[in-house]
Image (spheres, coloured by chain):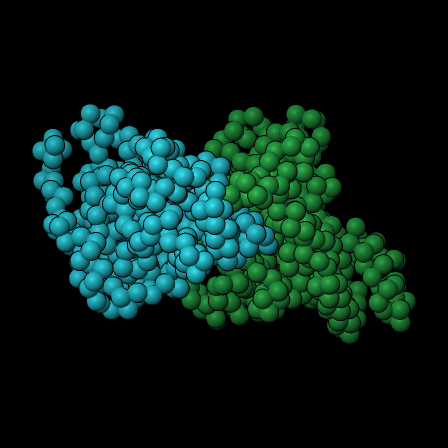
Chain colours: A cyan, B green
Amino acid sequence: MAALLGRSCRKLSFPSLSHGARKVSTETGKSLNLYSAINQALHIALDTDPRSYVFGEDVGFGGVFRCTTGLAERFGKNRVFNTPLCEQGIVGFGIGLAAMGNRAIVEIQFADYIYPAFDQIVNEAAKFRYRSGNQFNCGGLTIRAPYGAVGHGGHYHSQSPEAFFCHVPGIKVVIPRSPREAKGLLLSCIRDPNPVVFFEPKWLYRQAVEEVPEHDYMIPLSEAEVIREGNDITLVGWGAQLTIMEQACLDAEKEGISCELIDLKTLLPWDKETVEASVKKTGRLLISHEAPVTGGFGAEISATILERCFLKLEAPVSRVCGLDTPFPLVFEPFYMPTRNKILDAIKSTVNY
Amino acid sequence: MALSRLTSRSNIITRPFSAAFSRLLSTDTTPITIETSLPFTAHLCDPPSRSVESSSQELLDFFRTMALMRRMEIAADSLYKAKLIRGFCHLYDGQEAVAIGMEAAITKKDAIITAYRDHCIFLGRGGSLHEIFSELMGRQAGCSKGKGGSMHFYKKESSFYGGHGIVGAQVPLGCGIAFAQKYNKEEAVTFALYGDGAANQGQLFEALNISALWDLPAILVCENNHYGMGTAEWRASKSPSYYKRGDYVPGLKVDGMDAFAVKQACKFAKQHALEKGPIILEMDTYRYHGHSMSDPGSTYRTRDEISGVRQERDPIERIKKLVLSHDLATEKELKDMEKEIRKEVDDAIAKAKDCPMPEPSELFTNVYVKGFGTESFGPDRKEVKASLP
């Protein structure tokens, strides 16, 4: 496959995945917030592969969220550079770069602005390998974008567009929940031989602080993690929403409901087996995400689990999501799937 | 339009001064000719003359409205820091000449559409301070009912189509409005404003091609304040001559800090657009604040640069000098005018602060057209259910 490209294509190799999630979660490291963890991941990625590049709007000075601090100084303006204001151009350019065997790490400044690039992602990136019969691919492409509510973002700085991308075979969609996860997942995404869209919960850039190991490590994609064990109901979520769900689980525990919480991590392709096993144990499922409920990714999870666990379900699958409105300005507290809404849904599902 | 607002204000607030002001305002329609500061640079067209027809009334009007715009933006700055305005706030101080010059050249039938730096353009289109401050603080009395915020001001009666957050997205919309105007034989034009950062968006060129192909009365105005957020124009654009970017579409470069140059250019552009088709105007302007309230504005440019522009090219100072040199008012009268404006703004803020927030049911209104019974569900689909009105 590499030979067909006629260049000395670097074989995409990465450290053994056997040192997976369980080992990482017990290691200690430095206390970092999300943007620092992502920054570290980018430093490692550029360090280990001389043919990787980071570009996007304003990444040169460190980016609007400081995720790319120090990269331009360390690796030079030829590898870390700013682009003009054109998302379609940026992603298209990244696809081309990746097609020539490089790792293109593209930053879209806010996920709300990713739509001009949607055509490039869906029609070009996702289908490149398929339509060329494996002659070409843009596996080296990773698109990073901050997503999600931040308290005052309004219509265009708070959107969660993951559902649009989960509908596209050919790309992967990954969303980390915390700094340690983010670093490992981002490194896996960059080194994954498929184009990946990596959404970072912008709310957690400064808020989330965790011990992050300083070395190079990867967390496997398409493996969900049970972050809290329980017996009465399974909760599935990703990104910043998990923090809210965890609070709801604690509240539910006080009322005697034992909740199992699963972090999906990779939305496409998602780990159906882990969720299925959990629901077969508990018999109830609740999914929560910030994006509007209709057509959100929760619908896909619900339908799949229904197919697989129909006879084991004690109650209908519950979805606690954003409302079917544009992301509002002053009404954000009403719109968001808050912990009380989740708690109410947990209780009504358990008492069905 | 602004004139009647001025006289009504002076009735309410400054009775002792109203006599003095009416001397200035009601009598003088004597024409004055003003030379623009710089000649126009043209691309594929003949530039208009540097002599601009004006009147003393207009001159005072310009001063007053620009001072009002400036005061309004500074007040918005303080409100944001006091956390009464949340979300995003992009301020226009420094660029007032573009808004005022454009208004002076056109009617309310001509449409304007712009990006997110829209407070002053809204004011120029006839928006009231109360509507502005209410919308900024997210109150019911706001022009978008408190649901839009700083970036989404609209005024249908004055053909002001907003107020857009996504960079560059308003330009194809503007060309569509121009198409409708031509189709309906309205003898009106559309001004689609965008910035130097947005000038690199692909959709702009798509819209420009279509406008040129179909001879639409679209005027694309690049408000070049030389920085796309924090990126200087020479870092983002191969060709910073935005007025030439239209290639086959004529263009004009204008000193955007000179309200009369802007007025002349817009008049010229309107005539061109109605007769021949699209034209690009590049307004060479400058913003004193950063990109938005979260940007200090000094990390990518020096304070000397900012204060230099303020000293040499400030649009309000220029008008002030003209007013004084034509003996239309004394220094003291202008100072009093500014004091009155300050009070007007403070009153509007106080009134807006008292205004209630939108009702929670407003969360669901206007997602779709009213009356079609579309339902929006709450989280668990069982309990909370609101029929979209």
The front one of B132 and B125 is B132
Residue drawn at (21%, 67%) of the image: A28
Residue drawn at (50%, 58%) of the image: A151
The percent position of residue B270, horizontal first and vertical second, equals 65, 38
Can residue A116 be seen here? The reply is: no
Residue drawn at (58%, 66%) of the image: B83
- Eyeballing the image, is A216 above or below B158? below
- B106 vs B250, left or right, is right
Residue drawn at (60%, 62%) of the image: B85
Can residue B152 be seen here? The reply is: yes
The front one of A59 and B240 is A59
The percent position of residue A290, horizontal first and vertical second, equals 46, 48
The percent position of residue A198, horizontal first and vertical second, equals 32, 47
- A153 vs B191, left or right, is left
Q: In which quarter of the image is the N terminus of chain A?
A: top left
- Eyeballing the image, is B269 above or below B101? above
Name the outermost residue toward the bottom.
Answer: B332
Q: In which quarter of the image is residue A247?
A: bottom left
The front one of A249 and B126 is A249
The front one of B40 and B108 is B108
